[in-house]
Amino acid sequence: MTDFTIFYTDDDEDDLCIFADAVESIPQNINLQTYSGSQNFLNALSDSSVVPSVIFLDLNMPGKNGFDVLEELRKSDDKKDIPVVIYSTSSEPGNIERCLNLGANCFITKPVLMSDIIKAIEHAMQIDWSKFIPNRSNFVFKY
């Protein structure tokens, strides 16, 4: 399989480490770049020559939250088409609806079990994002 690049931003260092451990256990060549907080992520995305295959984005972060970052990405000419997976502890229907309306591609409530984290990552890797059209029936991934 060709290289797959994931950018993941979260303000929780433990979540970043757990996600990285999950990626390490997937037997495919994945380039994972993690960022602590939204501003670090946005700076890195602007400065990077690497375009991620998918972005995993936490919602609840200080400063610019995930909603703000998602809006900024969707307004950007060169970043608006990058698939964004909301990866949040929230499963609140209002947050899910808002993410769908703001242009996120998928919503995953952060799993507790490592096996479910791996399933969530593999799910995002298997989607042909160029053809995937999110709607209310396929937007939320159930692991």
Image (cartoon, rainbow, N blue to C red):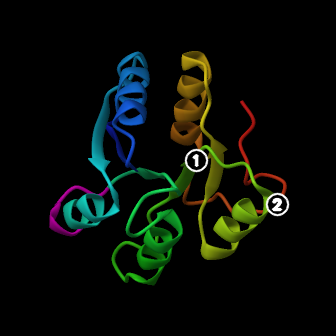
The image quadrant where one finds the N terminus is top left
Q: At 47% across and 73% down in the image, what residue appears?
A: 68
Q: Which mark is residue 88?
A: 1
Query: Disc 2 designates what residue?
Result: 136
The residue segment tinted magenta is 46-51
Residue 28's x, y, as percent? 38, 23
Cα gap from disc 1 to disc 2, whole angstroms:
17 Å
Left or right of residue 133: residue 112: left
Residue 53's x, y, as percent? 40, 50
Residue 55's x, y, as percent? 43, 53
Type of the residue with mark 1: Ser
Left or right of residue 27: residue 143: right
Residue 23's x, y, as percent? 40, 26
The quadrant in which residue 114 appears is top right
Q: At 82% across and 60% down in the image, what residue appears?
A: 136
Left or right of residue 24: residue 142: right
